[in-house]
Amino acid sequence: MTEFPDTTTTSDPSHDAPGEHGDDAAGYYTPGEPIADTKAPGGPISERWSTRKFEARLVNPANRRKLSVIIVGTGLAGASAAATLGEAGYVVKSFCYQDSPRRAHSIAAQGGINAAKNYKEDGDSVHRLFYDTVKGGDYRSRESNVYRLAEVSVNIIDQCVAQGVPFAREYGGLLDNRSFGGVQVSRTFYARGQTGQQLLLGAYQALERQVAAGTVETFTRHEMLEVIVVDGKARGIIARDMVTGEIETHLADVVVLASGGYGNVFYLSTNAMGCNVTASWRAHRKGAYMANPCYTQIHPTCIPVSGSHQSKLTLMSESLRNDGRIWVPKKQADCTKDPRDIPEEDRDYYLERIYPSFGNLVPRDIASRAAKNVCDEGRGVGPEVDGVRRGVYLDFGAAIERLGKEGIEEKYDNLFDMYERITGENPYEVPMRIYPAVHYVMGGLWVDYDLQSSIPGLFVTGEANFSDHGANRLGASALMQGLADGYFVLPHTIRDYLADGPFEKVPADHPAVVEAEQAVQSRIDHFMNNNGTRSVDSYHRELGNIMWEYCGMERTEDGLKKAIDLIRTLKDDFWRNVKVLGSAESLNQSLEKAGRVADFFELGELMCIDALNRRESCGGHFRGESQTEDGEALRHDETFAYVAAWEFAGDDEPPVLHKEDLVYTAIEMKQRSYK
Ligand SMILES: Cc1cc2nc3c(=O)[nH]c(=O)nc-3n(C[C@H](O)[C@H](O)[C@H](O)COP(=O)(O)OP(=O)(O)OC[C@H]3O[C@@H](n4cnc5c(N)ncnc54)[C@H](O)[C@@H]3O)c2cc1C
């Protein structure tokens, strides 16, 4: 295998060039002023983070006790930030909608967390993790942020080990590593198939320690429904107590959103059912720019959809691609056969065939599209859903021969058990069947190098921000980013903002507070009094179908325009005809969902506009009009090497597009190749 195996290719003139048909999204948006990240220092990339940490002003310990921080979210990004800021001595309030901070969606993460420790001595380094991440993101991420992420990755593992996180170890006692897609080294630390759970327990213990110390107060079963902006600065939130229905106002000097990703806009996804965009979207409507909202990650290894009754899809961790081989029958006629009866020579290990350098470990976007292509050709396996077999095999036969059943159990037993419980098939005996599903969003609220949004005093961490993964996230890098943001980045950057304190107190009857409270109340009143006929879930499912069909694995100009029309029509119908049962003064999941789906409608429309504007293919964003002769994603750097940061301009007003140019000084932009 070659090192750094990129081949530079130029845009293929026989294919559609950007601008050939004018601006696809013309009329759907208003051009705005360019923006830039003003916080990342210049100079050599390896020194930027040290410089910023040094330049960020300090707050002395006595003053920290006078400064308050609201953190929405207790996943890895939020719990780590709350614990660290509490330990530093700030007054922290921590919110989540679950019944315990440790039930945040991060708990679902299975496969592992990356760090450039080079324990395997296989050529890893901070620079290589940086390189892999920028390349994996298809050169659509900000290089200073990514370098910092790679740099602090090594600290995360030490911090978690010190907390007692039980990472897998080799027989000699050293921490073990495995490989994930898009890389040729082993840098993923793991705790069987429960890495997120173990990391979250570590962060949760650190958080609870601060609760006991009196620096952090937790508000569980509280849903943030509005952000309070006073004189242009974030100063608090409105939250609903989900048990009593009480609407509460919480004020602070600074607000942090660590509220996770919005993949559930697609209805079916691997995300927890509660994941939503409300916290981010409410902030967006108050002035926080939404960046690259169309960049969605479709994960290649999920249990296939089995019918229209489903409301959730299940991920089978990418770590399985270390040992499992992906294939479909060469002949359509074999697709209904028992896979064990199909001889080796009749199997098409298509990833190994098309991408010999990376094989089954190509990045997620590439593996997903390849699976779609073979199923579209009619070579999918498993039951037909809507007339098509959408499944490919993930086969452990060879690995079991090599490592024995015990060897496989040691690495993946809970994943194999989960698969068997859901499908009724034993993957030790029959190959797993998998298919791509929505999994993660690279888009999110725009932040600068300090993780501050376009609203001063509103910081955003973890999956909720857009910052590090460009157009495609590499596996095992979300946990790394969440913990990097919370333990190591935000605590340094937020102090520069807080150093301006103490801040003037905001009175409870300030017009901005009253306006936010009223906005929340009137939305709730609308839902409770709207005597419609259709359930919230049915709208959500229909919206999800539109998004998957037209803004999913492949997007086209016609499809996206159609999707925008369909979403607008459905949204109008939703506001007129939705039926919310129960009362607003008690636990009411229908009411909770109504608010979330209302925000998904607006987000879905913006995602389609963003996808329409970007007439290039990059990472998880594949525009049918922009592909190479052999069907690979084709970027157009001369036109689209920018972050699309969208500003909310008002209901029924087209959003405003601000472009942040992506400038690479430490890495050369190339057309990706994993062949
Ligand atoms: C099945 C699955 C497996 C994965 N496996 C891996 C893996 O192996 N490695 C990896 O790197 N990544 C993995 N990921 C991705 C990773 O788990 C997530 O990106 C990451 O955990 C997100 O962390 P977070 O802290 O940003 O948000 P979350 O963990 O989603 O937490 C969000 C928090 O915000 C709160 N919240 C949200 N909205 C509101 C609101 N309005 N009011 C109050 N509170 C609110 C929630 O209560 C929650 O506490 C996986 C994802 C899935 C779906």
Image: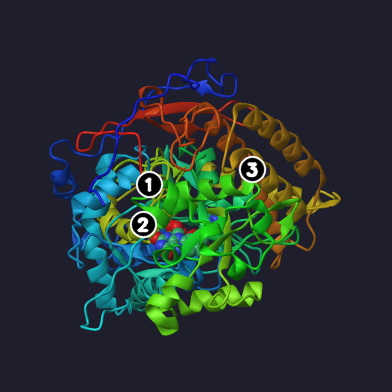
Task: Give the amino acid type for the residue marked by disc 2 in the picture.
Answer: Ser
Q: Residue 419 placed where, x, y %?
A: 58, 73
Identified at 41% across, 82% down, the residue is 404
Residue 477: assigned label: 2
Q: Residues within 10 Å of mark 2 (few under 14, many from 20)?
A: many
Distance from disc 3 to disc 1, alpha carbons, whole Å, reads 22 Å
Q: Secondary structure at mark 1?
A: loop
Q: Is residue 496 visible?
A: no
Disc tally is 3
Asked whether, in this view, residue 226 is left or right of residue 158, the answer is right
Q: Secondary structure at mark 2?
A: loop
User: Do the residues bearing badges 1 and 2 touch, measured as CB atoms within 8 Å?
Assistant: yes
Instruction: Name the quadrant containing residue 114.
Output: bottom left
- 299, 59: nearer the viewer: 299
- 127, 496: nearer the viewer: 127
Distance from disc 2 to disc 3, alpha carbons, whole Å, reads 25 Å
Q: Looking at the image, tell me whether mark 2 or mark 3 is earlier in sequence order.
A: 2
Q: Secondary structure at mark 3?
A: helix
Give the quadrant of the C terminus. top left
Q: Looking at the image, tell me whether mark 1 or mark 2 is earlier in sequence order.
A: 1
Q: Residue 14 placed where, x, y %?
A: 47, 20
Q: Residues within 10 Å of mark 3 (few under 14, many from 20)?
A: many
Task: Give the amino acid type for the residue marked by disc 1 in the picture.
Answer: His
Is label 2 within 8 A of ligand 1 (CB to nearest ligand atom)?
A: yes
Task: Give the amino acid type for the residue marked by disc 3 in the picture.
Answer: Met
| Residue, disc 3 | 547
Q: Residue 269 placed where, x, y %?
A: 59, 56
User: Do the residues bearing badges 3 and 1 touch, measured as CB atoms within 8 Å?
Assistant: no
Is label 1 within 8 A of ligand 1 (CB to nearest ligand atom)?
A: no
| Residue, disc 1 | 469
User: Do the residues bearing badges 2 and 3 touch, measured as CB atoms within 8 Å?
Assistant: no
Q: Residue 10 placed where, x, y %?
A: 35, 25
